[in-house]
Image: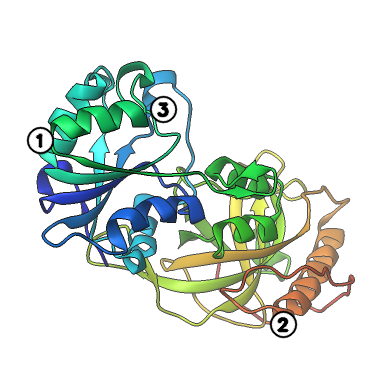
Amino acid sequence: MIPLRSPQEAMRPTAVALGSFDGLHQGHRRVIAAVAAAPTPGLVPTVVSFWPHPRELLYGEPRLRLDLPGEKLALLEPYGIRQLVLVPFTRQLSLLSPEAFIEQVLVGELQAREVAVGENFRFGHDRSGDTTSLRQIGERHGLRVLVSSMLWDGSERISSSRIRRALAAGAIDEANRLLERPYRFSGRVVRGRGLGRQLSWPTANLQVDGRKFLPQEGVYAAWVRTTAPTLGGEALQACGQPMAAVMNLGPQPTVDPLAPSAVEVHLLDREIELVGRDLEVEPLQLLRHQQRFAGLEELSRQIGVDAAQARLLLKRGSAGGVGVAQTPADESSDPPQQQNS
């Protein structure tokens, strides 16, 4: 696993791919390849991003992430990147002119000799710097600048915003197609109130990092794996076989309408104690939206239908695949003897 470092801890001198790279889609990978695919000898291929996102600090806009920093470490390693450097975005940094940013951060702290960006890259106070000024200022400092053009998919460019829109609509297939990998999130199983067990459908209740972008609320067929934290801290690595599951993401309108939104996972046909374990969830397809039922008996019957749909769907697909288009017909099923909390 590559290291996550501050600018002061970074290995130097560097060849820098600069940007947020949230989602690490094909356009991002093109920028990264400029410094990592055939690295210049003596330079450390490095991804540099800001944390928090500038708009969070400057405008108070919450920015949920497709990939948290720890998740990004595992994603970046196969592309030849040797370190991820997070530059703390402060008000003081936001006031730097484009030239001061290059002098102090890129050339000064990171000892950058090469920098790769996308063609829409902006930097410096009030976003006054662009790729033209980056080239001009970089030339004075012996900094080689590499600019990658944007990638288009049909009439719309490939972007992190487009992936978020797909997830917000519950379109997991479309999000996976744009990511070119399965969308996943992780969380730790905490002990719940046992409401699922009362319905004979016990669930693992996940505590998910509040900075993670989650899909539309609803019930999903999903793959679940147990994970283990790496020595570096928050990065997680899958260490178990994928397990078929049905996931509820959102509130509990029938059981407890006032309860906050939650992530609950019911493993299909397995009985495992999961409290305290870290799980990685890979939603495969939205089965239905949230709805309120007349009572617990009707809710339990619907969960049986959800479980049957999920079983059929997961048999057709495999964990780590990109998309299964068909939706199975409704079937009922008896709840298995199962699981944990």
| Mark with earlier residue (2, 1) | 1
Residue 234 shown left or right of residue 172 in the figure: left
Distance from label 2 to label 1 (Cα)? 54 Å
Give residue 160's position: percent from left, percent from top: 53, 44
Local secondary structure at mark 1:
helix
Local secondary structure at mark 3:
helix
Residue 247 shown left or right of residue 306 in the figure: left
Give residue 304's position: percent from left, percent from top: 80, 71
- Quarter of the image with the N terminus in it: bottom left
Residue 258 quadrant: top right
Which residue in the structure is indicated by mark 3? 56
Which residue in the structure is indicated by mark 2? 315
Indicate whether 273 appears above or below 19: below
Nearer the camera: disc 2 or disc 1:
1
Residue 332 seen in the current view: yes
For residue 144, which numbered disc appears in the image? Answer: none
Which residue in the structure is indicated by mark 1? 108
- Quarter of the image with the C terminus in it: bottom right
